[in-house]
Image (cartoon, helix red, strand yellow):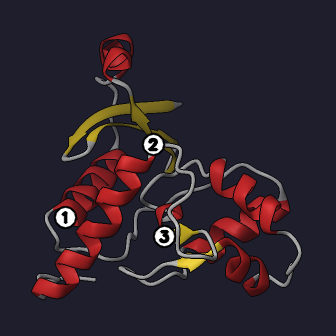
Amino acid sequence: MKYYQIMKTPIGHLLLIAEGNALTQVDFLEDNEIFEKADMAHRSNEVLEQAKAELTAYFEGNLTTFTVPYTCRGTDFQKKVWHALTRIPYGETLSYEALARKINHPRACRAVGQANNRNPLAIIIPCHRVIGKNGNLVGYGGGLDKKVWLLQWEQRVLKEGRILAK
């Protein structure tokens, strides 16, 4: 059974989806999609409540690592990329090229970018921490404005020493 929730955050609404005991999707919603998906938002479970609590703590500057159980559907390569994304420390960035090297596919920068683009769990799997090798912010499914916000937020939280829990 699928469970759905819509969550308001400082950077817009998120659609959270869980199947059984695992989070399967976190997507940014456009303003016009909120009302279209609103009828889905009444079905929740413990996983979605945990995800909402952890995302709330993240946006309050009190959480750097998510523990909500999740599962991702994708190719073995995509899963390898997504797993590597979870290893990028809070507040830090890594280039697509460096990420490709970390997963032992040094020539697969574009494939890493494509896997990043297909990340089913925005913020939870921090694809916003991947940047171009020249330091430019490139691509983000939620929009570059959200990527900028997330990166600046993490830097601000670290600078202010606000982290209360990992």
Q: Is residue 14 left or right of residue 137?
A: left
Q: Residue at x 50, y 62 (%)?
A: 137
Name the amino acid, label 3: Arg
Image vertical order of residue 128 relative to residue 48, above or below: below
Q: Residues within 10 Å of mark 1 (few under 14, many from 20)?
A: some
Q: Quadrant of residue 5?
A: top left
Q: Nearer the viewer, residue 140 or 15?
A: 140
Q: Is residue 36 visible?
A: yes
Name the amino acid, label 1: Ala
| Quadrant of the rendering where the C terminus is positioned | bottom left
Nearer the N terminus, badge 3 or badge 1? 1
Q: Is residue 56 left or right of residue 95?
A: left
Q: Nearer the viewer, mark 3 or mark 1?
A: 3
Q: Nearer the viewer, residue 21 or 4?
A: 4
Image vertical order of residue 139 relative to residue 79, above or below: above
Q: Residue at x 35, y 59 (%)?
A: 148
- Where in the figure is residue 122, as x and y percent of width and height? 47, 52
Q: How many marks?
A: 3
Label 2–label 3 contact, CB within 8 A: no
- Where in the figure is residue 114, as x and y percent of width and height? 74, 52
Say which residue label 3 marks. 129
- Where in the figure is residue 135, as x and y percent of width and height? 53, 75
Q: CA distance from mark 3 to mark 1?
A: 19 Å
Dot label at residue 142? 2
Say which residue label 1 marks. 57
Q: CA distance from mark 2 to mark 1?
A: 20 Å
Q: Is residue 52 left or right of residue 114?
A: left
Q: Nearer the viewer, residue 104 or 110?
A: 110
Q: Is residue 134 left or right of residue 44?
A: right
